[in-house]
Image (cartoon, rainbow, N blue to C red):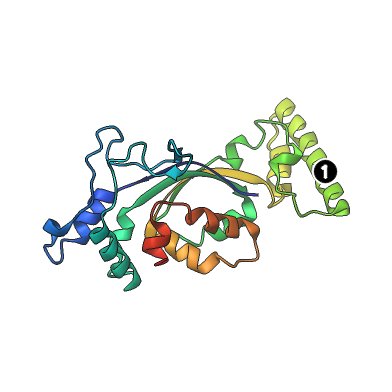
Amino acid sequence: MIKIENVDVFGWEAAIRGMRNPMNSWDKSDSDFSCEYCDGCHWEYVVNDDGDQTWCNHTKCKIGEADLKLMKSLSKAGDDHGKFLRMINVTLDITAPLYWWKEFDTYKVGTVANSCSTMHKIHAKEFELDDFSHEHLRDLALTNLEKTIECLNRYRDCFIKTKDKEYWWQMIQLLPSSYNQKRTVQLNYQVLKNMYLARKHHKLDCWREFCAWCETLPYFKEICLNE
């Protein structure tokens, strides 16, 4: 499973301004960032009066046709020409299994993440089945996971009572990779574009769901995928 929450997208005005620096073409920019309510056009999951998802609480903010055309052209030309994409920032909370985070961690450039700590907080609450991704497990495997959870909770109780680090080690080294961890992540559109193109057909459904989420970001399909 993967859960994505608290999405915020920002940096549009600076990205467009910088995009036009090489040709001194600022006068050709036709985007409107005059909205006085949303502090520089931070996009969030909001729903307008028609029930459609939008990237701003108000309709005054929009990317102009000329700016959008140039963004699509530069993005299509490659990472060097499309470096303005690095200035469109995305922050979000992701909850996903450790086996997914292991692959996510291959993306070291342009990413920042603060995670919930298994080192410090593994014993903070009793382990439950829903703390783990188990949607594909069959009966025997699910039974074994449940036994592992029972074992983890025994060592947790012992650690809480004795503070003996030996019991803590049992939890750390026994913890399955299906354990769901939450991280607050900062990315940008260029990183997301690379992730999408590399992972959209991945065998892990977490990656396919993540790529589907990318498509919901404002102008992502138009700029990064040239749709």
**Is the residue 31 above or below the residue 203 in the image?**
above
Which residue lies under the disc numbered 1? 146
Question: Which x, y percent locates residue 15?
Answer: 26, 54
**Is the residue 23 above or below the residue 9 in the image?**
below
Question: Which x, y percent locates residue 216?
Answer: 48, 52
Q: In this orientation, does residue 109 appear? A: no
Q: In this orientation, does residue 62 appear? A: yes
Question: Which x, y percent locates residue 192?
Answer: 44, 59
Residue in the image at 31% along x and 35% along y = 38
Q: Nearer the viewer, residue 187 or 114?
A: 187
Residue type for callout 1: Glu
Tell me if 129 is positioned left or right of 187 in this view: right
Tell me if 127 is positioned left or right of 26 in this view: right
Q: Quadrant of the C terminus?
A: bottom left
- Quick one: which residue is furthest to the bottom in this view? 77
Tell me if 101 is positioned left or right of 173 in this view: left
* Number of numbered discs overlaid on the protein picture: 1
Residue in the image at 53% along x and 58% along y = 211
Tell me if 22 is positioned left or right of 227 in this view: left
Q: Nearer the viewer, residue 8 or 185?
A: 8
- Quick one: which residue is furthest to the top in this view? 161
Per the image, label 1 sits on a secondary structure element best described as helix
- Mark 1, other Cα within 10 Å: few <14 / some 14–19 / many ≥20: some
- Quick one: which residue is furthest to the front in this view? 50
Q: Nearer the viewer, residue 126 or 67?
A: 67
Residue in the image at 52% along x and 58% along y = 105
**Is the residue 84 above or below the residue 57 in the image?**
below
Choose top left, top right, bottom left or bottom right for residue 42. top left
